């Protein structure tokens, strides 16, 4: 499927014009740049627009690709978990474990993340930033030290609340 085909699908489905379709190209460019050979840092992209303007539709178009880890939203506890399943004690249920091996994290509703208590948001953003640097270590009382190696591209969808949060 070419970019022209993708644009046509969104134009027909959403009734979008050329200006609206640029958001699709932005999202695809950010997604694909994660896998360019020789890149130094994978991109992080944020689609910011008011509610009900098509951000979810753009992000969901990427959900079923093999190198996509998609979530409606994310939490600090789920990103790096110390939880140990007694049935499978070696299985890591953390979102970060899924992101190993060069993946793109697509979060449909980052607005929900920013609506949480400030300390939770700052903790999650700190953990994301550490993971972005390629290696992440986490210690919990039940699991001990767990090391992760990741190449982490991100596509977050958010309302303009992002602008308010960044000013605070």
Image: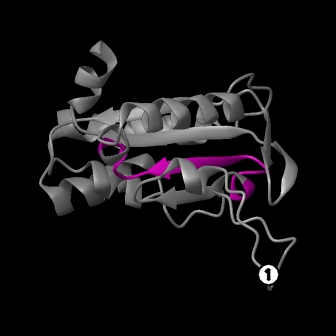
Element assignment for label 1: loop
153, 119: nearer the viewer: 119
Residue 153: which quarter of the image?
top right
Does 48 sit left or right of 91 as displayed? Answer: left
Residue drawn at the location 16% of the way across and 47% of the way down: 53
Crowd rating for badge 1 (residues with CA inside 10 Å; few <14, some 14–19, many 20+): few
The residue lying furthest to the top in this view is: 167
- On screen, residue 148 above or below 57: above
The residue lying furthest to the front in this view is: 141
Residue 81: which quarter of the image?
bottom right
Residue drawn at the location 15% of the way across and 39% of the way down: 50
What residue would you read off at disc 1? 86
Measured as percent of width and height from the top left, residue 32 is found at 59, 41
8, 99: nearer the viewer: 99
Measured as percent of width and height from the top left, residue 115 is found at 29, 41
Q: Judge whether residue 56 is colored magenta.
A: no
Does 85 sit left or right of 149 as displayed? Answer: left
The C terminus - image quarter: top left
Measured as percent of width and height from the top left, residue 47 is found at 33, 36
Please provide the residue range marked out in magenta. 97-111
């Amino acid at each position: 499927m070419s970019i022209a085909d993708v644009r046509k699908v969104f134009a027909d489905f959403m009734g979008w014009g050329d200006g609206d379709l640029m958001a699709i190209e932005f999202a695809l460019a950010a997604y694909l740049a994660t896998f360019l050979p020789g890149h130094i840092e994978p991109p992080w992209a944020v689609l910011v627009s008011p509610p009900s303007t098509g951000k979810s539709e753009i992000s969901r178009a990427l959900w079923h690709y093999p190198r996509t880890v998609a979530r409606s939203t994310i939490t600090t506890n789920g990103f790096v978990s110390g939880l140990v399943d007694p049935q499978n004690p070696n299985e890591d249920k953390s979102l970060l474990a899924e992101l190993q091996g060069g993946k793109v994290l697509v979060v449909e509703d980052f607005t929900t993340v920013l609506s949480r208590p400030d300390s939770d948001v700052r903790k999650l953003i700190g953990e994301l930033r550490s993971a972005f640097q390629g290696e992440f270590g986490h210690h919990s009382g039940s699991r001990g030290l767990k090391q992760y190696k990741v190449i982490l591209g991100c596509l977050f969808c958010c309302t303009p609340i992002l602008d308010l949060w960044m000013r605070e």
